[in-house]
Image (cartoon, rainbow, N blue to C red):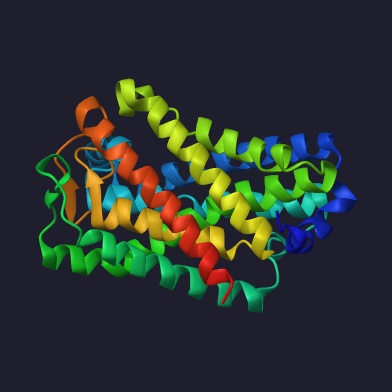
């Protein structure tokens, strides 16, 4: 495996690679994120008033309105803030050290994102059976109105998650442990377990976890091969762009989607029919990203 470029991301982590520091950093990040999120919720409630907050709260749990989806996505900006404090206090690192060299990162993001968007356009126009054929959700005019801010919100959310998992955790673990099974496997496993939500996914929750683990490994591999976080961000961004803004499962985080699939994430028949195709799409996206990086 050609992971020599990964050293660009590992080098800034070597001086603070002790596992105790990493544990302290993870705990501090979680605490700061929870405190900031609580403060944001209190501020939002005071701005819109108790009655409006009470009306908004159910949608925030499921993401079934445009505003609720945007709030859920933009709140990940607070994770970036928490991570920046942790890096400075615990590791004496900057947030930029998680991204890698800026010039190559920008070029890699453009190449990978372009390749993935082309792949997505090809897949969108492939024929599908009725069980997987999406149906209209938002009116096109309303969807178009929300599209720019929706894309920005998805970029904030995906960048925050990649900074945390493939940036922070992966680089700190790789600075301490040489075997990819540890520095790829541990962040991917944690990323997957955070998708464990039986209340939303029902009996299909472990399928979602498996998919998230596969995504984590693909993103980790791209990060190590490229020496920047940009390809992983691009993979995550285009994937979530499709899953949140283009076509979402019915009844869960579909508030900004132009289309919805005719099944929910709790519908076993629909999810089992959809899962292999989605996993194959992830694999094709990973391969497309690797080809784009070789250009």
Query: Outermost residue, right direction?
Result: 15
* Residue in the image at 41% along x and 26% along y: 206
Q: In this view, does 207 lie above or below 107?
A: above
The part of the image, by quadrant, that contains residue 105 is bottom right
Q: Quadrant for the C terminus, please.
A: bottom right
| Residue 123 falls left or right of residue 238 | left
Q: Identify the residue at horizontal 78%, vertical 41% (top origin).
A: 179
Q: Position of residue 93 (x, y in %)?
A: 78, 58
Quick one: 46 or 215, which is closer to the camera? 215
Q: Position of residue 66 (x, y in %)?
A: 24, 53
* Residue pictured at 39% horizontal, 30% vertical: 207
Give the percent coordinates (x, y) of residue 23.
Answer: 75, 34
Q: Which of 244 and 270 is in front in this view?
A: 270
Q: Along the line of sight, which residue is nearer the eye, 218 or 174?
A: 218
Identified at 16% across, 55% down, the residue is 127
Q: Can residue 267 be seen in this view?
A: no
Q: Where is residue 18 in the image (x, y as percent from the top left)?
A: 86, 40
State the residue in front, 114 or 20.
Answer: 114
Is residue 130 shown to the viewer in this render? yes
Q: In this view, does 174 lie to the left or right of 105?
A: right
Q: Quadrant of residue 275?
A: top left
Tell whether 277 sits left or right of 270.
right
Q: So how many labels did they put on this image?
A: 0
């Amino acid at each position: 495996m050609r992971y020599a470029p990964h050293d660009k991301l590992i080098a800034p982590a070597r001086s603070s690679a002790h596992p105790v520091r990493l544990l302290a950093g993870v705990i501090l990040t979680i605490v700061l994120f929870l405190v900031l999120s609580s403060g944001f919720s209190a501020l939002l409630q005071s701005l819109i008033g108790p009655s409006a907050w009470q009306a908004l709260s159910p949608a925030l749990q499921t993401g079934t309105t445009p505003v609720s989806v945007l709030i859920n996505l933009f709140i990940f900006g607070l994770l970036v803030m928490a991570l920046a404090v942790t890096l400075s206090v615990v590791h004496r690192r900057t947030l930029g050290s998680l991204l890698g060299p800026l010039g190559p990162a920008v070029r890699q993001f453009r190449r990978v994102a372009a390749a993935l968007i082309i792949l997505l356009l090809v897949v969108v126009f492939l024929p599908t059976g009725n069980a997987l054929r999406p149906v209209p959700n938002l009116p096109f005019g309303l969807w178009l109105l929300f599209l720019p801010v929706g894309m920005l919100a998805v970029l904030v959310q995906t960048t925050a998650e990649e900074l945390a998992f493939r940036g922070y955790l992966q680089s700190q673990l790789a600075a301490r442990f040489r075997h990819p099974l540890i520095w790829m496997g541990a962040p991917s496993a944690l990323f997957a377990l955070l998708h464990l939500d039986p209340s939303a996914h029902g009996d299909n929750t472990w399928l979602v976890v498996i998919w998230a683990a596969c995504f984590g490994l693909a993103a980790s591999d791209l990060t190590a091969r490229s020496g920047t976080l940009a390809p992983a961000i691009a993979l995550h961004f285009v994937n979530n762009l499709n899953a949140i803004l283009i076509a979402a499962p019915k009844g869960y985080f579909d508030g900004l989607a132009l289309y919805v699939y005719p099944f929910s994430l709790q519908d076993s028949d629909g999810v089992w029919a959809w899962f292999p195709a989605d996993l194959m799409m992830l694999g094709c996206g990973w391969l497309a990203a690797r080809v784009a990086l070789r250009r």
